[in-house]
Structure formats: C-alpha cells, structure tokens
Amino acid sequence: MLLNEREDEAQRERERADELEEHAGAALKMMDGMPDLAPVGRKAPAVIRKMICHMIARRTPPSAVVPNIVAVLKYVAPSLLDGAHLPNVDFVRKVRREMGRTAKTLAASRLARATSVETAHVDGSSLDQHETVAVSVIADGKHLTLDASRTAIGKTSELEAQSFEDTFIDLAQMLDDWHDESEATGVDAATRAAIGASSEVGLHRVRKPVTDNCAQALKMASIICDKIAAAVEKHHRDNGTWDGLSADEKKKELATFAITCHNHLRNILVKRGAKASTARLKDLLDDELGRIPKDERIVADADALVRSIWKEFCSTHKNYAKGQGYKVFTPWLRRERVGSLFLAPPRGDCGSRHDFSTSAAMLLYHDRPFFVDFLQTRMWGDKNILEDAVYVMLNCVEIVAEIRARAIIHDKLVEPLVFFCCSKALAWGPLNMSAVYNTLEKTLELVIENPSMLIDYELDVFAAFIDQPAYVEWKKAKENETARLVRPLETAGETPADTPALEPIGNEDDEEEDDDEEDDDENDDDADDDAADDDAAAAALRPSAGDLKST
C-alpha cells in the first residue's frame, strides 16, 4: 500500500514537472520575442517610435504618451523598463511632425498616381487662435485629405487662396525629396516610378474647386479659378503643347467650375427662413413683449426657446445649475408618464448647423405637453426665472404655431434635402442637386399661394425622384423608425440620473381600452367619413410629381 502511494505521488510530481517545463518554454519563447527598449547609441529604439506613432494616431496628447507607455509596461512586462530609453515630450512632438510629413507625402503619391481628380475642396477655419486652411480632393472617386490644417497667414480670400496653391507646391516638393532619398539609397528607377511623378501634383489637375457659400469663400473660389487657369497654361507651355492648341481647345482647357457646397446651401436657406420668421414673430408680439419686464427673459424666438429647454430639461448633462432635468424632471417623467413616447430635448448648448432651427422643432413640438405638465407642478415653489420663461413661451399660441410650422418644414423640405445631399447610395454632385433645388423652388412658389398644402400627410414634395431606389428605401426607413418608451422609475440598483428615461414597455391599460372599444367604434364611422372628406380635399390641392419635376 505504501509503495503504491509513493508511486502515485511520484507520477504527480513528474506531471507537475512536465507542466512547469512547458510553461517555462512558453515563457522563454515569449521573452525571446520581447523588444529591446535600450537606446541605440543616443537614439530611441524603433519600437519606441512605433509605440509613439500608434498613440499619436489615436489622438493621445504628447505629454501623456510616455507615461502611458510606462504604465502599460509596469503591469505587463516590468523587466523591459530596466535600461529602457524613454524620450521626453519634445521627442514625441518631433515624431508627430514626422508623422504629419509622412502622411502628406503618401497623400501626394496617391494624388500623383490618380487617373482623375474630380473636385478639390477648401475651407478656412480658426484653430487655437491660428488661421488654418483644410485642403482635400476627390481623386478616382475617393476622398483624399492633402492638408487637414495648413497654417494661413491671414483670413482674407487672397491669403487663403495662396495657401491652397502652396499646398500643391509643397506636396510636389515632398515627392521630389522622396525620389532623391530613394535614389541615394540605391532604389532602382522602376521601383521609384511607383512613387508617382511630382509633375502630376499641381493645380493644373484641378478643374472644380468646392467652397462654402459665404461672400469671402466665393471670392476665394474666383481667385483659385484664376490660379488654376494659369497653372494649366503653364503646364502646357512647359510640355510644349500650348501653341499647338486651337482657340476652342485652349478655351476648353482653361475652363473651371467653382462649386458651392449644397449642405451649406441648405443651411443658408434655413437660416434665412428662421431669421425672417423670428422677425415676423417679434413684430406680431411686440405689444405683449413690451409689457413684460426684460429680466423675465421672455423672448419671441424659437431658437432661444430650444436653448432654454436644453438648460431646464436635459437629463444627460449636468450643465446648468438652475436646470431640473436630471434632478427632478426625469424622476417625474418616469413616475407620471410611464409608457409614453418622449423624444428628449435636442442639445442646444453647443455649436450646431443652421438647420437645427427646424430639426429641433420636430422634437420640441412633440415633447411640449410633457414640459408644460411638469412646469405646472413647479409653479408654487421658489421663483425660477428659467422655468417661468419656458412655461410662458410654451403656452404662447404664436410661439407654438412657429414651432409647429418649423417642424412641418423640416419634415417636408429640410429632411429630404439632407438625404439628397448626403446619401452615399446616390452620391449626387452639383448638377444632380440642381434638379432637387429646382423642384424645391417650384414647391415654395405653390406654398406661397396655398400654405396649407404642407400639412397634407400624403404630400411628397420630391415625388419626382421616386424612380431612385435609394430615395424609396430612405422613405421606408423613415416610416419604420422606432423609439423607446418611458420606463418606470422603480428599477433595481439605479438612480434617476443614471439612465435615460426611454425603454420599451407594454401597454398596461389594455383592459380599460377593451372596455371602451364599443364606445370608440360608435364614433369611428363618423371620424372615417370626415377623414375621407379631408383626404379628398387634400388630394385635390396636392401638386402632382409632374408639376414639380424639374426639366
């Protein structure tokens, strides 16, 4: 018996030894694959540079790169820290500059090898109090960023146009530098040819600059067109082909087309409309507003109301001390309106597109009853200027009508325009969009004569484009959109501010509804007759697709 026990114990020891040997082999193999972080002379090893590049590519601040590397190694492979070369933040910033130049050089190579350049896009902006210009192109049907934030000397049209031209000059020089360095290291000509020729990087390949629609950008586009024409002529003269062209051929070669962004155009239309409607609303309510003290913060401005709604009712951002969204409104909503459809207030504390004026109205008009009912419960507490102002504006008939009108405009006009501008399935350009805006113009002319046509549920302003499968699919997706309903507050382990107030929930009043079905049915027949009459009248006023289709 004793002998058997010792044999079993010896067998277990052999198995443990084999297991330890296996683990030791795996550990040694892993150690063999560990990089050496020791300095190469006085320089950082390649692996450190690669780690820095990975972090910068994921937008890690330079000051945090090395501490992050140390933190990871400390827990994963602390032995690598012994003798490791850990550079300072200046070196990290140097690597970032190298990455920027590498990215631009690769972009220049792609541009040089592209068979066609459809459009070039330029937009000025301010970054950290410095004027910058972003330059990109559509080459062979793909977007290619040439310089995301090129520093401009100033914000005038001339200076930004010069920055646009300098971008192409610098990229061509980068390709020349790449060719020279490759040749110096012994790379053969056939391999260097894959880099692309610097002569193929220049304004002479651009014919359609795209800008936004402000006056300064339009002037910049005009200057860029002149620069493009000069570059095309110079390119032909350098190649000795200019004198051989006829007058018509020269005119065709020098033709340029300045294009404005249709997303900007849509927002300009909404901005102008919102500005005009706000002015009209203020004139309409001028006498009433004159009797209200200024410190009550009551204004005839739907956009200002949206911002106030966000301050008061936002439940996801504790951004305003006087707001009651996450503290009081969300618990009230989840006690008193369980199972209701609440769309949540649109964000109004940050910059936004101008069509926010109509898109926010869609949500605000639907959620208005919730806001009013909640504010009524707050009427007898301490004075709150924000709540009082919001309550008054939400109960003003004229302001509610303004919100409703904007919501209708967004549903019938603005939202389809967003689709046509941004649909990747359509991928429409300016010439395609001209037909869309011609249709919009004809519709607005009809609306002037008969404004009520927009409240026709069946009206499709852009029915002329129903032959586009992407538009049909978008309409179906829009009709099938769903939203979660308000869920009850009594959920284990959570507080009112922890989760949004939206959750699918069944109808708890089914039995009561069944009791009322007979009474409802008695009124349904009359309602159906009235609805049929309304539909017939709307159909008679509704323009046909042929009336709106652009020619």
Image (cartoon, rainbow, N blue to C red):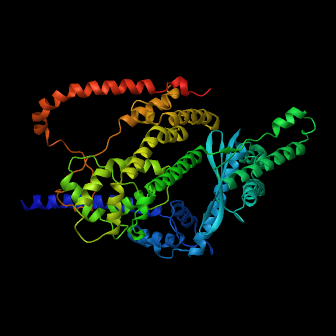
Instruction: Quadrant for residue 373, please give it.
Output: bottom left
Q: Does 550 sit left or right of 197 as displayed?
A: left
The residue at 90%/34% (across/down) is 247
**Residue at the extreme right of the image, as rendered:** 243
Indicate the quadrant containing the C terminus: top left, top right, bottom left or bottom right: top right
Nearest the viewer among 394 and 31 is 394
Residue 383 can be seen, yes or no: yes
Nearest the viewer among 443 and 175 is 443
Indicate the quadrant containing the N terminus: top left, top right, bottom left or bottom right: bottom left
Nearest the viewer among 360 and 468 is 360
Whole-percent x and y of residue 276? 53, 51
**Residue at the extreme left of the image, as rendered:** 1
The residue at 62%/35% (across/down) is 434
Q: Does 161 sit left or right of 327 as displayed?
A: right
Residue 500 can be seen, yes or no: no
Nearest the viewer among 135 and 309 is 309
Is 504 above or below relative to 76? above
Whole-percent x and y of residue 190? 76, 44
Whole-percent x and y of residue 16? 25, 60
The residue at 60%/36% (across/down) is 433
Whole-percent x and y of residue 213? 64, 49
